[in-house]
Amino acid sequence: MIASHIISNAELGKRLRHARERLGYSQAKVGEHLGCSRTVVSRIELGKSKIDSTRLQVLADLYGHSMKGLLGPAFDYEAPGLLSTFKRLIFGRGG
């Protein structure tokens, strides 16, 4: 089944930035997790660079969202991902 809702790179970047900031991660820390520079993370969040599905899945897992949630028409800007919140509380992981 093909998704009927397509979001722009800029909108996806906005969602990724919001999810990262809600969890207190820095772009540099996310870059380390992805194996890229802070600049690459910044360009993705600004919608200037595309993100491949593998890296998007890594970010979805890191931020506690599903890929469907990140890409869908009704992204929840108010709720941080529960999995990432749990990890931060238990393991003290953060940006």
Image (cartoon, rainbow, N blue to C red):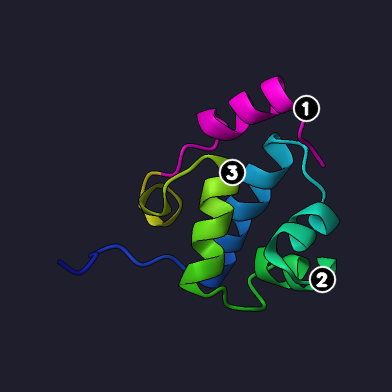
Q: Secondary structure at mark 1?
A: loop
Q: Residue at the location (46% across, 52% down)? A: 70
Q: Mark 3 or 2 closer to N-term?
A: 2
Residue 84, above or below 57: above
- Mark 1 or 3, which is nearer the eye? 1
Q: Residue at the location (42% across, 47% down)? A: 66
Residue 11, above or below 48: above
Quarter of the image with the N terminus in it: bottom left
Q: Write down the region rendered in magenta.
A: 75-95
Q: Is residue 90 or residue 53 the one in the foreground?
A: 90
* Magenta stretch holds residue 9: no
Q: Which amino acid type corresponds to the residue marked 3 in the rendered image? A: Tyr
Work out how far the residue at label 1 is from the one at label 3, CA to CA, in angstroms. Answer: 14 Å
Q: Which amino acid type corresponds to the residue marked 2 in the rendered image? A: Ser
Dots 1, 3 in contact, CB < 8 A: no
Task: Classify 10 Å Cα crowding around label 2: few (below 14), some (14-19), many (20 and above).
Answer: some
Q: Secondary structure at mark 3?
A: helix
Task: Classify 10 Å Cα crowding around label 1: few (below 14), some (14-19), many (20 and above).
Answer: few
Q: Residue at the location (64% across, 78% down)? A: 49
Q: Which residue is mark 3?
A: 63
Q: Which residue is mark 2?
A: 37
Residue 6, above or below 69: below
Q: Which quadrant would residue 5 be assigned to in this image? A: bottom left
* Magenta stretch holds residue 81: yes
Q: Is residue 29 or residue 91 the one in the foreground?
A: 91
Q: Which residue is mark 1?
A: 92
* Extreme-front residue of the structure: 91
Residue 28 lies, in percent from the top left, at 84, 58
Q: Secondary structure at mark 2?
A: loop
